[in-house]
C-alpha cells in the first residue's frame, strides 16, 4: 500500500506534538529525548506511523473502538453528507440520523425502547447514575440512592464514574470521591482463592450472592442501582462464571434494584453478539455504549432505557421538575448517528458478528496453545474478539509477573509490527493481563500473526 502523506516531511508535526499535545495515559518525560508516536493512516487492520512503519492493530485504535476497521469510505461519506446538510442542532430537537439510528438500535435490543444520546461512555454512564438518583427522589423520598459497582470494573473518567470504578489506581490522587457508591466483590473465578469462603463448585452463584450480602449490609431500601460490565474490560478481561448473571438478575428483582449494564467496550459486536449482556439472557433497565457504536468515525455514545424507566419521567406533566433535566451538547448531533447507521449496516452486510465468533474461537485456541508452551500464561479468557491472557510467575500461587515484564512483552510485539494491549494503571499489583481486541474484520491470518508475535515476545522476555 502507498501512503502519499508519508512522502512529506512530518518534522513540524512531530515537534508541534512534542511542544503542545498532552497525550492520554502517557508519561511525557521520555519525549524530551525521543519522538512522540504520531499515527498517520489506517486501512483495514493496519496502521502506519509518521516513520512509515506498518503494524497490525490488535487493540482497535488503542482502546477497543475501531470495530469495522480503518479506511471505511462509506462511513466517511455518510458523515460528510450529513454535515453538509445539517451539522448541528441540540438534541432538544430531533434529527434524521438520530431518529433512524435510535430505531435501528432498539431493533437489536428486545425489551429496551429509549435512546438518550451523549458524547462518551463516561457521560453515558453518568446519565444513568443521574436517572437512578432522580428516580430515588421521585419514588422513594431520596432514600434509595446508592449505586453498587463491582471490583475491577471500569465505568469512566469523570469524578462520578471514577467513584463507581473498581480499579483503584485509576482513582488514586483524584479524591475525594463522590458519596453513595458502594463496591461489591468481583466474579473472577481464576482468583477466587483471594476471596474468603469462595467455593470450587457453583462459584458463579456464590459470587453473585456476595452482591446480595452488600445489599443487606447497606439496607435494600437505600440501594437504587447496580452497574456492571458484561465482560470486565480493563480490569483483566474477566468473563463471568456460570450461574452468575442469572443470580444477579434474581437479586435485582428481589430488592427492586435497577440493573445498569455498561456495554461501552462490549457493545456493537465485540463479543460476537450485538451486546455482551445478550449472551446471558438478562433484562437490564439501562444499557450504556460508546466505542464501537460508530467504530471511532464520529463521537457518539448512548444511554438506552426501558419504557418503564422512561415513563417515570413523564408521569406528572404538571410538575416542572418531573422530567430528566439534562443535556449533552454534542450528544446525537448529527455526525455520530450518521456514522453509527452505516457502521451497523457494515456489520450486518459483511456478517461480522459471525466472523467475530469464529475468529474469537481461533484466538482463544491459539492462546491456549501458547499456554501449553509458556508456563508464564496462567489463564486464557475471552468472549468473541475480546480476549486476555494473564501472566503469572508461578501457576500454583498465581503470583503475577511484574508490570515491567508485561510492558516488555507489549514492546516486543510492537517491535515485530503488532500492537497489543495490557491492563495498565488499573488494579494495584494485578496489571498483568495481555489484552486483545482486533477489529471484527480480522482474518485467520491476522489472528495467527498476532498470537505468533506474542509467542516470540514471551520467548524473548521469559525464555
Image (cartoon, rainbow, N blue to C red):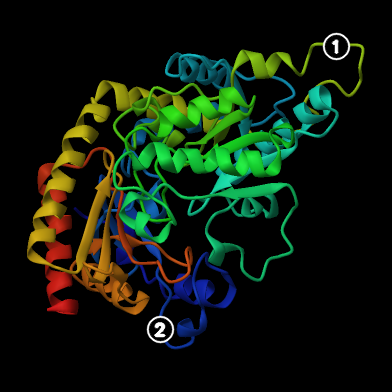
Label of residue 316 in the image: 1
Of marks 1 and 2, which one's residue comes earlier in the chain? 2
Q: Is residue 330 left or right of residue 240?
A: right
Q: Nearer the viewer, residue 186 or 5?
A: 186
Q: As displayed, is residue 82 above or below residue 384?
A: above
The residue depicted at 64 percent of the width and 39 percent of the height is 216
Which SS class for mark 2?
loop
The residue depicted at 75 percent of the width and 33 percent of the height is 144
Q: As displayed, is residue 356 above or below residue 249?
A: below
Q: Where is residue 420 shown, x and y percent of the image? A: 29, 60
Q: Where is residue 193 shown, x and y percent of the image? A: 35, 59
The C terminus, quarter of image: bottom left
Q: Label 2 crowding class (10 Å Cα cut-off): few <14, some 14-19, many 20+?
A: few
Distance of label 1 from label 2 (alpha carbons):
61 Å
Quadrant hosting residue 54: bottom left
Quadrant hosting residue 388: bottom left
* Residue 89 appearing in the image: yes
Q: Is residue 188 left or right of residue 149?
A: left
Quadrant hosting residue 212: top right
The residue depicted at 29 percent of the width and 32 percent of the height is 272
Q: Nearer the viewer, residue 88 or 240?
A: 240
Label of residue 34 in the image: 2
> Of the residues tagged 1 and 2, which is closer to the observer?
1
* Residue 240 appearing in the image: no
Q: Nearer the viewer, residue 48 or 68?
A: 68
The residue depicted at 57 percent of the width and 42 percent of the height is 213
Amino acid at each position: 500500500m502507498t501512503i502519499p502523506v508519508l512522502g512529506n516531511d512530518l518534522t513540524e508535526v512531530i515537534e508541534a506534538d512534542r511542544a503542545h499535545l498532552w497525550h492520554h495515559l502517557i508519561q511525557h518525560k521520555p519525549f524530551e529525548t525521543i519522538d512522540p508516536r504520531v499515527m498517520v493512516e489506517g486501512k483495514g487492520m493496519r496502521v502506519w506511523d509518521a516513520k512509515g512503519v506498518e503494524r497490525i492493530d490488535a487493540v482497535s485504535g488503542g482502546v477497543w473502538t475501531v470495530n469495522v476497521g480503518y479506511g471505511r469510505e462509506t462511513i466517511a461519506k455518510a458523515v460528510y453528507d450529513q454535515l453538509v446538510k445539517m451539522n448541528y442542532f441540540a438534541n432538544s430537537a430531533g434529527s434524521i440520523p438520530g431518529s433512524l439510528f435510535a430505531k435501528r438500535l432498539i431493533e437489536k435490543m428486545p425489551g429496551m425502547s429509549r435512546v438518550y444520546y451523549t458524547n462518551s461512555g463516561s457521560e453515558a454512564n453518568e446519565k444513568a447514575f443521574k436517572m437512578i438518583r432522580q428516580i430515588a427522589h421521585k419514588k422513594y423520598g431520596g432514600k434509595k440512592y446508592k449505586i453498587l459497582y463491582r471490583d475491577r470494573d471500569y465505568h469512566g473518567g469523570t469524578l462520578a464514574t471514577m467513584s463507581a470504578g473498581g480499579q483503584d489506581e485509576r482513582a488514586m490522587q483524584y479524591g475525594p470521591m463522590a458519596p453513595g457508591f458502594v463496591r461489591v466483590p468481583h466474579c473472577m473465578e481464576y482468583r477466587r482463592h483471594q476471596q474468603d469462603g469462595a467455593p470450587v463448585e457453583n462459584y458463579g452463584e456464590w459470587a453473585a450472592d456476595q452482591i446480595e450480602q452488600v445489599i443487606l449490609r447497606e439496607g435494600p431500601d437505600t440501594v437504587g442501582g447496580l452497574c456492571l460490565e458484561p465482560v470486565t474490560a480493563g480490569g483483566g478481561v474477566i468473563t463471568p462464571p456460570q450461574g452468575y448473571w442469572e443470580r444477579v438478575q434474581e437479586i435485582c428483582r428481589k430488592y427492586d434494584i435497577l440493573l445498569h449494564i455498561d456495554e461501552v467496550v462490549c457493545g456493537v459486536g465485540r463479543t460476537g453478539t450485538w451486546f455482551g449482556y445478550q449472551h446471558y439472557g438478562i433484562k437490564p433497565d439501562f444499557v450504556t455504549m460508546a466505542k464501537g457504536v460508530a467504530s471511532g468515525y464520529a463521537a457518539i455514545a448512548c444511554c438506552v432505557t426501558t419504557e418503564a424507566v422512561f415513563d417515570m419521567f413523564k408521569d406528572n406533566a404538571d410538575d416542572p421538575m418531573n422530567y430528566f433535566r439534562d443535556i449533552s451538547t454534542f450528544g446525537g448531533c448529527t455526525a455520530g448517528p450518521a456514522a453509527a447507521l452505516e457502521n451497523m449496516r457494515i456489520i450486518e452486510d459483511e456478517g461480522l458478528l459471525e466472523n467475530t465468533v469464529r475468529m474469537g474461537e481461533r484466538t482463544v485456541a491459539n492462546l491456549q496453545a501458547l499456554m501449553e508452551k509458556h508456563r508464564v500464561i496462567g489463564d486464557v479468557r475471552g468472549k468473541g474478539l475480546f480476549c486476555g491472557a494473564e501472566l503469572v510467575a508461578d501457576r500454583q500461587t498465581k503470583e503475577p509477573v511484574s508490570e515491567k515484564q508485561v510492558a516488555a512483552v507489549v514492546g516486543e510485539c510492537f517491535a515485530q509490527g503488532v500492537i497489543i494491549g495490557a491492563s495498565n494503571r488499573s488494579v494495584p499489583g494485578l496489571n498483568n493481563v495481555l489484552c486483545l481486541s482486533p477489529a471484527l474484520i480480522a482474518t485467520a491470518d491476522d489472528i495467527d500473526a498476532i498470537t505468533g508475535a506474542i509467542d516470540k515476545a514471551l520467548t524473548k522476555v521469559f525464555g
